[in-house]
Image (spheres, coloured by chain):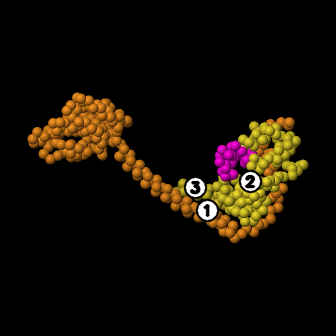
Chain colours: A orange, B yellow
């Protein structure tokens, strides 16, 4: 049998010859066909939309741009609410609980002052603890009538494993608008909320009741 | 705004290209379809469907007034016509489409002496004897140098079907002693 080895390019050229012969054979003289009105109408519709397509295209681009802006806006919001959400695990023990936070990423903003937006009436600032870098530890201690007290602490969160005193206490998961962490309620009425927000660890505790402690915790910025 | 402006230019080019193809080739397309369908209404339908396909494959067409474009359009319209034929004329089960077969001339233009004329004659005879479904995939692949996916889009078949047809066509060539490398 005849054997021919041919490259793809050469084969394409042979097909080109075949094509020329084919077209000369079948389409040398093509009579004019009078297409039906139905055909002409359909083809007009097919061609006409493309003539107005630049305007449609411009509209589509504008709609697309607006959609991108809206989506971008949503993305910013999502980022803002996602930031403080950190997973953690509470391991209850008899005397204490290990709260395991996932270590935050990125650099810590140095010397960032924190503000407590809400302090219950009747409490006055008694002591301030301030230890600059590297921990940037800050502590505010408030006292009031009937031996009421409130302690607010904040420092840079480095250790992902925090041990807290949970003797005679109940420790549960707590999620708030501005962070997540744990709620510790002691039998003597003391309430402690610990949570991580961004690069910082916050600790709010006192004997002013859960609702007030929560308000204080949520007001910190 | 520059982005919008740039985006509009190819659209305008495509529009002009499509209008020219319509003006230049609609009669030829009708003839190509009517050879298979032998029915004015169905042939016009085939032409219209073929234009819809061509509209989506304008990137496969470079120079409008060329044998290559003429061939491409013929392949599309014949493919559509064959599909319509199988849909509407199932009664003709034993119909054999030999309308596309050509009488090979003794002389033809051979641009370069790429391979021996005897070999070219032989290959042309072999291609001419192939069923059209295999001939058209070979032409689209090697003459129009389309990718498998583009072939599938032009012929309205799945990618795997296009690949299988190409593979079968190459096997048929090999069975006849033609090894395309």
Residue A61 relative to residue A192: left or right: right
Tell me the mark number nearer the camera, choosing from 2 and 3. Answer: 2
The residue under label 2 is: B75
Magenta-drawn stretch contains B155? yes
Q: Which residue is mark 1?
A: A50
CB under 8 Å between callouts 1 and 3?
Answer: no
Location of residue B44 with respect to A188 vertically, above or below: below
Q: CA distance from mark 2 to mark 3?
A: 32 Å
Q: In the displayed structure, would residue A42 be above or below residue A67?
A: below
Instruction: Pinpoint residue A149: horizontal percent, then vertical percent.
Output: 15, 39
Q: Quadrant of residue B80?
A: bottom right
Identify which residue is drawn at 74% across, 42% down: B168
Q: Which residue is mark 3?
A: B6
Q: Secondary structure at mark 2?
A: helix
Report the quarter where the C terminus of chain B lies.
top right
Image: magenta residue range: B136-165
Q: SS class of the residue under badge 1?
A: helix
Q: Report x, y in % for residue B24.
A: 74, 62
Q: Residues within 10 Å of mark 1 (few under 14, many from 20)?
A: some
Q: Position of residue B135 (x, y in %)?
A: 77, 48
Residue A41 among magenta residues = no
Residue that extends furthest to the left in the rendered view of this protein: A146
Question: Quick one: label 2 or label 3, which is nearer the N terminus?
Answer: 3
């Amino acid at each position: 049998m005849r054997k021919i080895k041919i490259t793809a390019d050469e084969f394409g050229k042979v097909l080109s010859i075949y094509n020329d012969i084919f077209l000369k054979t079948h389409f040398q003289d093509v009579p004019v066909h009078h297409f039906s009105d139905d055909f002409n109408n359909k083809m007009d519709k097919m061609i006409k939309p493309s003539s107005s397509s630049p305007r449609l295209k411009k509209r589509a681009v504008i709609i697309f741009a607006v959609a991108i802006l809206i989506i971008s806006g949503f993305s910013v919001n999502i980022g803002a609410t996602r930031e403080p959400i950190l997973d953690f695990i509470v391991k209850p023990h008899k005397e204490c609980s290990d709260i395991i936070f996932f270590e935050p990423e990125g650099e810590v903003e140095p010397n960032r002052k924190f503000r407590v937006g809400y302090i219950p009436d009747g409490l006055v600032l008694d002591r301030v603890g301030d230890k600059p870098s590297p921990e940037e530890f800050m502590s505010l201690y408030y006292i009031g009538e009937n031996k009421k007290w409130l302690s607010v602490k904040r420092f840079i969160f480095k250790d992902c494993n925090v041990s807290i005193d949970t003797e005679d206490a109940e420790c549960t998961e707590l999620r708030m608008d501005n962070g997540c962490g744990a709620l510790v309620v002691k039998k003597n009425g003391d309430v402690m909320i610990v949570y991580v927000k961004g690069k910082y660890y916050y600790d709010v505790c006192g004997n002013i009741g859960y609702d007030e402690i929560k308000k204080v915790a949520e007001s910190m910025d | 705004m520059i982005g919008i402006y740039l985006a509009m230019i190819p659209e305008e080019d495509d529009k002009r290209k499509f209008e020219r193809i319509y003006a230049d080739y609609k009669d030829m397309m009708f003839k190509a379809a009517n050879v298979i369908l032998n029915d004015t209404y169905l042939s016009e339908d085939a032409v219209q469907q073929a234009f819809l396909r061509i509209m989506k494959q304008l990137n496969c067409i470079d120079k409008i007034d060329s044998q290559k474009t003429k061939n491409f359009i013929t392949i599309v319209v014949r493919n559509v016509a064959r599909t319509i034929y199988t849909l509407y004329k199932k009664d003709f089960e034993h119909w054999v489409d030999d309308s596309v077969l050509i009488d090979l001339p003794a002389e033809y233009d051979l641009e370069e002496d790429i391979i021996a004329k005897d070999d070219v004659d032989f290959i042309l005879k072999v291609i001419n004897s192939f069923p059209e479904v295999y001939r058209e995939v070979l032409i689209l692949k090697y003459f129009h140098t389309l990718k498998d996916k583009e072939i599938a889009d032009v012929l309205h078949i799945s990618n795997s079907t296009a690949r299988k047809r190409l593979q079968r066509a190459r096997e048929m060539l090999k069975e006849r002693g033609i090894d395309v490398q």
